[in-house]
Image: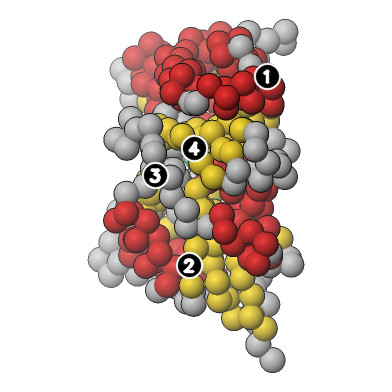
Amino acid sequence: MIIKKNIGIDLGTHTTQVYLEKRGIIINEPSIVAFNNRTRKIVAHGFEAKKMLSRTPAHITALRPIVNGVIADFDMAREMIQRFLRSEKFPRALITRMIISVPTNLTEVERKSVEDLLKESGASSVHLIEQPLAAAFGSHLDINSPTAYLIVDIGAGTTDMAIISMNGIVVSKRLKIAGDYLDQEIIKAVRDELKLHIGEPTAEDIKINAGSAVPFGEKLETIIRGRDMISGLPREITIKDTQVRFWLNKPLKMLVDALKDLIEIAPPELVGDIHKNGIYMCGGGSLLRGINQLFEKEVGVAVWTVEEPLTSIARGTGLIAENLREYGHVLNNFPRFKLDKSVL
Ligand SMILES: Nc1ncnc2c1ncn2[C@@H]1O[C@H](COP(=O)(O)OP(=O)(O)OP(=O)(O)O)[C@@H](O)[C@H]1O
Ligand SMILES: [Mg+2]
């Protein structure tokens, strides 16, 4: 017998997560596909494809079909999703309704592209929810009440900031300053200051192992390897937290400024609520050491990181997938008033 199931999906720049109704998150893999350049045939996806990133032979390309939170390569994104959904982790269930989280301030064309992608992947119906709203659901915030919450989702490709009240987004802002951007700043600084070529995975290691937004009691350092720009040979160096903090200072300031801008244009009553409730952060970027303290100091409001910030959005979509009757009204509601349509 085939059982009908709903699923929740968070199709992120870095990671794709799929939540199967009554089961929880069953797919949690890198959003990467590797394909043969000549035939365009996919040779690996998810974890397997990640291993190939920057180590592929000439005829294989590994790519991320999602860039800055939006579908950049439709065919590859569809292939990737279809492969995830065909995984043996799914019981013999017919996936019907799909609830997918999307960044704030998408254009209609971008939203339509997400819908088409899932329809072509077997969905009987597709429902969109903006990521900060899904994160609030996944974190069990009482967003149905007449009080406001400010959610900041720092992913790999985008940072979404939204003020939510009565199950809807009142004002929001999306920036391309997120985890990947921080990695690129590290690559540039290591190249310019230390004359060493490093790739994205090494830059991410530096950020995670020695990165922080404010000074810490303990000193952090990490040893990395790269290619010396003068000799062309491999070289090993130690990177200290003070260096990484300096390199990340500018992009973090841009996030702080965006947060201040958002609060500035929020209706005054809601600003009072935010002062009382604090700011909630989610997404992988919220795990950067000391980012709470930096935001608290700069904005003057308490900042919390939600529980399990890497999965809060997927869990939010899953919760809705499980309770469509109760929560269905929050789906496909796109705000009439937006702070900034042009993404920074
Ligand atoms: N401990 C950590 N410190 C700093 N950054 C981290 C840490 N752990 C993960 N990250 C970063 O978080 C990002 C991934 O976060 P997440 O999984 O929320 O992104 P995503 O949802 O795939 O992307 P997006 O929402 O932008 O489409 C990566 O840039 C990763 O380097
Ligand atoms: Mg995300």
State how far apart marks 3 and 4 are (Cα): 9 Å
Quadrant in which the C terminus is drawn: top left
State how far apart marks 1 and 3 are (Cα): 29 Å
Looking at marks 1 and 3 on the same chain, the residue that comes earlier in the sequence is marked by 1
Q: For residue 4, which quarter of the picture?
A: bottom right
Name the residue beneath numbered marker 3: 336
Looking at marks 2 and 1 on the same chain, the residue that comes earlier in the sequence is marked by 2
Q: For residue 208, which quarter of the picture?
A: top right
Looking at marks 4 and 1 on the same chain, the residue that comes earlier in the sequence is marked by 4
Quadrant in which the N terminus is drawn: bottom right
Instruction: Report helix, strand or loop for mark 3.
Output: loop
Name the residue beneath numbered marker 4: 170
Looking at marks 2 and 3 on the same chain, the residue that comes earlier in the sequence is marked by 2
Name the residue beneath numbered marker 2: 126
Which is in the foreground here, disc 2 or disc 4? 4
Q: Position of residue 137 (x, y in %)?
A: 66, 48
Kind of residue at badge 1: Ala
- Asked if the residue at label 1 sits under 8 Å from ligand 1, the reply is no
Q: Nearer the viewer, residue 109 or 20?
A: 109
Looking at marks 3 and 4 on the same chain, the residue that comes earlier in the sequence is marked by 4
State how far apart marks 4 and 1 are (Cα): 20 Å
